[in-house]
Image: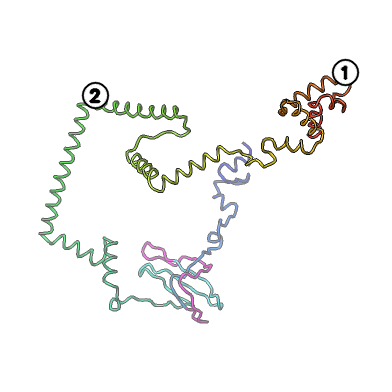
Amino acid sequence: MSSLAAARADNFYHPPEYDPSKGSLKKFTGAKGKNQYETDGVIRFELPMDGWCGCCGRHYGKGTRWNAKKEPDGSYFSTKKWKFTFVCKGCPTTFIIATDPKNTDYEFRTGIEKKIEEHSEAQDDVNEGVQIGLDAIYKVGGHAAEVEREDKRSNKMRALEAAQDDQRKVATEEERFDTLVEMGEARRRYDYDANAALRQGMRAKRRAAEKLVDDTNAKQLSIPLLDFDPADGAEAIAALQANQSGPSLALRASEVKLRKRVTSSSVFGKASALHAPGMKQAALVSSVPAIARARASVLSQGDQWPEPTQRSQVNTKIRRKQAKKTKGPANPPASLADENPLAALAVAYDDSD
């Protein structure tokens, strides 16, 4: 172990030249102490009661603090007496206050005058109710407590009543004790029956819990079910009856009607007039002359005007046929419209789209 670790082990450093036979380590090193009292004999002193400076007349209240010199001042029997020396804060007057173990008081010796505060019983105007409350709190003291104790000692009737109360209390406690003993003996005597009853109750609780878990899983719920409570059932029936009668029933009917209308309608709203069936075809016929001539030719020959799917099929067939003949772009020529009105219809329809 290093010298520093050894010094920290007991928090003391022993110089090499230190000889324990010549005195203590504190005396060898010349240490004066760890605080201001050990070094200079100064403590933090509080004034035990009000006082005035004898020179400047400055008043000091109880609890005012100074840095005072604490020195022994004899003894009273085995109790050591102390004196405290400090200076006035308003002038250079020195105050000296000493303890007085004989009178359990403080002696103001020099520079400061003590404020005399004496209590006179003639001026005691304590409220009787307050005194009674204090006596109730502090049972060991006070006039009322002393009277109570004296009455218990001297009043024979009260002592007899207290003895009878004690006897009744003892009888009650004995009866209670006998009852407890009988219960304990019955449990020890019929331990198998008690254990069987306990296990049966535990089985019933476990089965009920397992049934609730199965019901929860069967209903695919994320929260566990609880036992049925008749009070909850009654509240649910009352709420259902209230919803099926009076204004609640009419409100529910209106809600159902509104729900049906919302679910049956399109998410895009109502169709405009241009999106009605046949409106696009009529607009094309009226705006494109080729489609109008093709429609008139088809109708004059006694044929039926093709539907959009039929026009698409015709358009595809014409494009394929034209591609085979010309080996070029699959677009029907303008002369084809004169030969086949449906071809003209396909060309005009494609151009309109």
Residue visible at 38% across and 76% down in the picture: 117
Give amino acid for label 1: Lys
Q: Residues within 10 Å of mark 1 (few under 14, many from 20)?
A: few
Which mark, by number, is residue 192? 2
Residue 211 at x, y = what percent?
A: 38, 27
Q: Which residues are magenta?
A: 52-81
The residue that disc 1 covers is: 325
- Tell me which secondary structure the magenta stretch mostly adopts: strand
Residue 84 at x, y = what percent?
A: 48, 69
Q: Residues within 10 Å of mark 2 (few under 14, many from 20)?
A: few
Q: Tell which of 145 and 58 is nearer to you.
A: 145
Quarter placement of the N terminus: top right
The answer to whether residue 64 is magenta is: yes
Which comes before the other along the chain, label 1 or label 2?
Answer: 2
Is residue 247 positioned above or below 320 on the image?
A: below
Give amino acid for label 2: Tyr
Which mark, by number, is residue 95? none
Residue visible at 27% across and 64% down in the picture: 135
SS class, disc 2: helix
Q: Of circles 1 and 2, which is in front?
A: 1
Residue visible at 75% across and 27% down in the picture: 311
Q: Quadrant of residue 327?
A: top right
The answer to whether residue 191 is magenta is: no
